[in-house]
Every structure is written in structure tokens, then in C-alpha cells.
């Protein structure tokens, strides 16, 4: 069957994820702006849930309030709490009955890197905007069962064989999934259940699964999600309970909680 040239052109536009006349660079700029707007809507949140990987399960809780106040607790089988009140980082280890204050001699950039490394494991994807570099990012439109419209952001640094693709619902840019490719290895993070807030015009994940190829290897289930609750400054201040040994640690990059 003969296919008219104009119809073929329109089909190619759809398959390549572009709308007719749409500039990919303009799409990327619009996505960056919408992500910043979305971040501005979430000024605080409280999360609680369970992370499971293989036979290991860990309960966790997390509280956040802008600008940059954080409190994260790891439950059974461990029991440790980290808190950043805007000025100091402290750790309470209930199992060992020890309390630490971190000595801070870092630059602002180093400090931000350490805090991000420490607290990121408490926050599933979808509650913060993806960290996109200035270079090596492309955007294309796509379809998704939870969309129905979506946009894919692919990050591929020059000279690297690692490629990360974020899938976001359009136009709210709710997180729907992430694919990570390194050589022939492919892993994927999928949103299985969501909580939507009509007043904020956005949705956040309630259950996510991690896949290695066709095999599920991990799951995170949030049992509590509160968006924009009132969190007093005292929420993020920890003091040493009676009977705890008090000490100090060095404020430096580490593997995580």
C-alpha cells in the first residue's frame, strides 16, 4: 500500500517523540522550568515506609522542610537518626546508646554534597527533581500507561557508557520511572502506586519496584505520606538523651546511613 509522504512524515514525528515544529532544546528548557516550579510546591513533607531488598527489610522515616532541614531515622533492625537543623549535623544511635555531633570544616559546596549523600537514601525518587547536569541531557516526548503523555529525559555524559533516562508525566512532571544502562546491563525503577494531591496538582509515589533486567530485586513501600505539613524548627533539633555517651565525628563524605 502506498503511504503518502505527508502521512509518513507525521508518523516519524510521533515515533521520534517530537511534535511538529517543536524544538527539542525548547522542550528541555520548559521541563527544567516546570521541575523548578514543582519543587517549589513541596515546601515540606513527612514519609514513613519500608525498603526491601532480597531477604532484608528496613523501616525508615524522614521529614523535610525548606530550606534544607532534614531528619531521617532508620528503624529495625537498626535504630539510628540523623538530623540537620540548618547549622549542625547530629547522629543518635539508639542501639549503642551513643550521640554524635559532626565537626564541620567544609565549604558550602562540600557540605551540600555530604548532606545529599547522607539523606538521599531516605527519599524515594519522585519527591525531588532529578539532578540534571548542564550538558549531556536530551528530552523527548513519549507515551506511558500512567501518562498518558510523558517526557523522557536522558542523561549521558560525554565519554561515558552510562545512560540514565527519567520518565516523567506531562505536564505535571510526576516521576513514573527511571532506566539505567551501563554497557549491556539494564536496570529500572518503576512507580507501581501513587498518591495524588489535587490541591498541589501533582502525584508522588507510594510503591516503587527496582528491576535488574526482567527480575525484581527490591521494593520501597511508603505507609505514610504527608505533603506540606507544618513542621516547627524543633522537629529537626536532636539532643542527647540521658545515659547516652556523647562524642564527635568528622563531617566528611561517607557511604551513607
Image (cartoon, grey):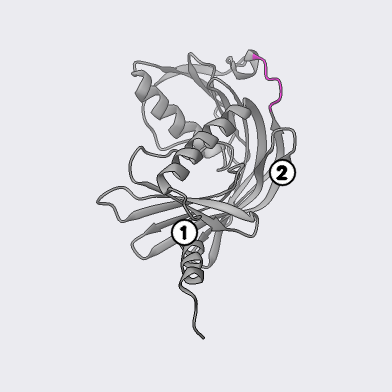
| First-in-chain label (1 vs 2) | 1
**Residue drawn at 34 percent across, 54 percent down:** 162
**Residue drawn at 48 percent across, 71 percent down:** 8
**Residue drawn at 62 percent across, 25 percent down:** 43
Q: Nearer the viewer, residue 10 or 211?
A: 10
Give SS at disc 1.
Answer: strand
Give SS at disc 2.
Answer: strand
**Residue drawn at 49 percent across, 55 percent down:** 20
Query: Horizontally, is 91 left or right of 225 in the view?
Result: left
The quarter holding residue 185 reads: bottom left
Q: Give x and y (percent) for residue 219.
A: 60, 53
Q: Nearer the viewer, residue 16 or 172?
A: 16
Is residue 132 covered in magenta?
Answer: no
Q: Which residue is mark 1?
A: 187
Nearer mark to the viewer, of 1 and 2: 2
| Residue 221 vertical placement versus 227 (above, below) | below
The quarter holding residue 74 reads: top right
Q: Residue furthest left?
A: 159
Can I make out residue 95 in this image? no
The magenta segment is: 228-232
Q: Which residue is mark 2?
A: 195
Q: Give x and y (percent) for residue 49.
A: 66, 41
Q: Nearer the viewer, residue 119 or 138?
A: 138
Q: Give x and y (percent) for residue 149.
A: 60, 54
The quarter holding residue 28 reads: top left
Is residue 229 covered in magenta?
Answer: yes
* Residue 54 marker: none
Query: Horizontally, is 172 left or right of 223 in the view?
Result: left
Amino acid at each position: 500500500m502506498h503511504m503518502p509522504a505527508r502521512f509518513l512524515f507525521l508518523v516519524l514525528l510521533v515515533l521520534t517523540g517530537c511534535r511538529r515544529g517543536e524544538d527539542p532544546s525548547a522542550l528541555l528548557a520548559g521541563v527544567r522550568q516546570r521541575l523548578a516550579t514543582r519543587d517549589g510546591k513541596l515546601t515540606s513533607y513527612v514519609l514513613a515506609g519500608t525498603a526491601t531488598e532480597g531477604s532484608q527489610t528496613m523501616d525508615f522515616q524522614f521529614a523535610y522542610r525548606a530550606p534544607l532541614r532534614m531528619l531521617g531515622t532508620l528503624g529495625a533492625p537498626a535504630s539510628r537518626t540523623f538530623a540537620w537543623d540548618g547549622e549542625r549535623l547530629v547522629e543518635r544511635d539508639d542501639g549503642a546508646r551513643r550521640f554524635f555531633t559532626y565537626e564541620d570544616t567544609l565549604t558550602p559546596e562540600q557540605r551540600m554534597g555530604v548532606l545529599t549523600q547522607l539523606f538521599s537514601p531516605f527519599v524515594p525518587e519522585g519527591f525531588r527533581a532529578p539532578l540534571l547536569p548542564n550538558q549531556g541531557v536530551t528530552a523527548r516526548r513519549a507515551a506511558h500507561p500512567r501518562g498518558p503523555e510523558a517526557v523522557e529525559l536522558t542523561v549521558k555524559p560525554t565519554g561515558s557508557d552510562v545512560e540514565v533516562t527519567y520518565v516523567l508525566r506531562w505536564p505535571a512532571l510526576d516521576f513514573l520511572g527511571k532506566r539505567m544502562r551501563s554497557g549491556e546491563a539494564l536496570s529500572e525503577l518503576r512507580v507501581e502506586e501513587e498518591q495524588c494531591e489535587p490541591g498541589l496538582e501533582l502525584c508522588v509515589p507510594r510503591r516503587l519496584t527496582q528491576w535488574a533486567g526482567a527480575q525484581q530485586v527490591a521494593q520501597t513501600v511508603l505507609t505514610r505520606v504527608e505533603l506540606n505539613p507544618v513542621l516547627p524548627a524543633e522537629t529537626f533539633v536532636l539532643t542527647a538523651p540521658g545515659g547516652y555517651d556523647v562524642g564527635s565525628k568528622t563531617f566528611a563524605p561517607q557511604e551513607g546511613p
